[in-house]
Image (cartoon, rainbow, N blue to C red):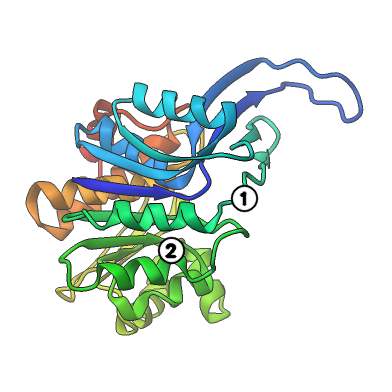
Amino acid sequence: MIYTVTFNPSLDYIVSVSDFKLGLTNRTDSELLLPGGKGINVSTVLQNLGIANTAFGFTAGFVGEEVRKEVEQLGVKAEFISLDEGVSRINLKLKSIDGTEINGRGPKIPREAVDALMTQLDRLDDTLVLAGSIPASMPDDIYQKIMERLDGRDVRIVVDATKDLLLNVLGHHPFLIKPNNHELGDIFGVKLSEREEVVPYAKKLQEKGAVNVLVSMAGKGAVLLAEDGSVYAAEAPKGTLKNGVGAGDSMVAGFLAGYGESGDYEHAFRMGLAAGSASAFSEQLATKDEIKKVYETC
């Protein structure tokens, strides 16, 4: 079983406005309401690929109940911890205005809720995905504490996070990390725009403890440094960008699905690239058929 953790789930209200005018009343041309958060995105694509998984996280208020409902309707097993106070966030995404977003803050997460999550994690025996930023109300070393708690349990841990949040867990040897090229460049204070430029810096993260390093590069494709020393790099499949939200999360889901099928890193890499691209080419997160179609072109 694959488990995902989303510390700050949301309802994503995705709208397009063809002729947006600041300071005036605008009408939407299209609207879409989806459960959001990086871990939930991974869960959604895994479920679309037919892989059973469980979503952990914290929800609050009427928005939180809707998040739970939407996630369960997708077929994902939702084991969110309900908070007594606050309301889960609603994120507004104006997809027709250069990807403009307004993200909510979400509820405060008390210590007892964090302890309850830790208890949930004690039963893990397979793969755990930790994705996204940490709310200000949570301890900033929560990723480290989770990995310390699971040390020696033979649990594959995937971390999709930025800067110090990522660097601080490398000593616990995460099975997979997935920075994008900009995040990787920020870590080392360099600009990385080409696939060959990514390799030496991804190798540095591997030397610091990451087992596999998968770097997403949007339209430039992706690069994988695998634990067996192999390096895989490919340009992005051709297609029309419709929605960049969740493409990186889809890549994580595709990689895990591919690796689970075969244990082969080349197949896992191609599945990750196909899933990420298929979601970028779709109005929503990619379906199995969409991913399969793109995979054939990778």
Q: Residue at x 18, y 76 (%)?
A: 229
User: In the image, is 149 to the left or to the right of 30?
Assistant: left
User: In the picture, residue 298 is in which quadrant?
Assistant: top left
Element carrying mark 1: loop
Q: Which residue sits at x=62%, y=50%? A: 108
User: Which label is found at residue 179?
Assistant: 2
Secondary structure of the residue carrying numbered label 2: loop
| Left or right placement of residue 188 versus residue 254 in this view | right
Position of 53 with respect to 215 (left or right) is left
Q: Which residue is depicted at the point 66% across and 46% down?
A: 105
| Of callouts 1 and 2, the N-terminal one | 1
Residue 118 in view here: yes
Residue occupying the point 23% across, 40% down: 295
Q: Is residue 263 above or below residue 58?
A: below
- The residue where tag 1 is placed is 108
* 290 is higher (above) or lower (below) than 181: above
- Please rate how many residues cluster around mark 1, counting C-alpha atoms within 10 Å: few if below 14, some from 14 to 19, many from 20: some
**Is residue 46 or residue 104 the one in the foreground?**
104
Q: Find residue 129 and report its image quarter.
A: bottom left
**Would you say 189 lies left or right of 175 here?**
right
**x and y percent of residue 63 in the render?**
57, 29
Residue 252: horizontal and vertical position, in percent?
32, 51
Q: Amino acid at mark 1?
A: Lys
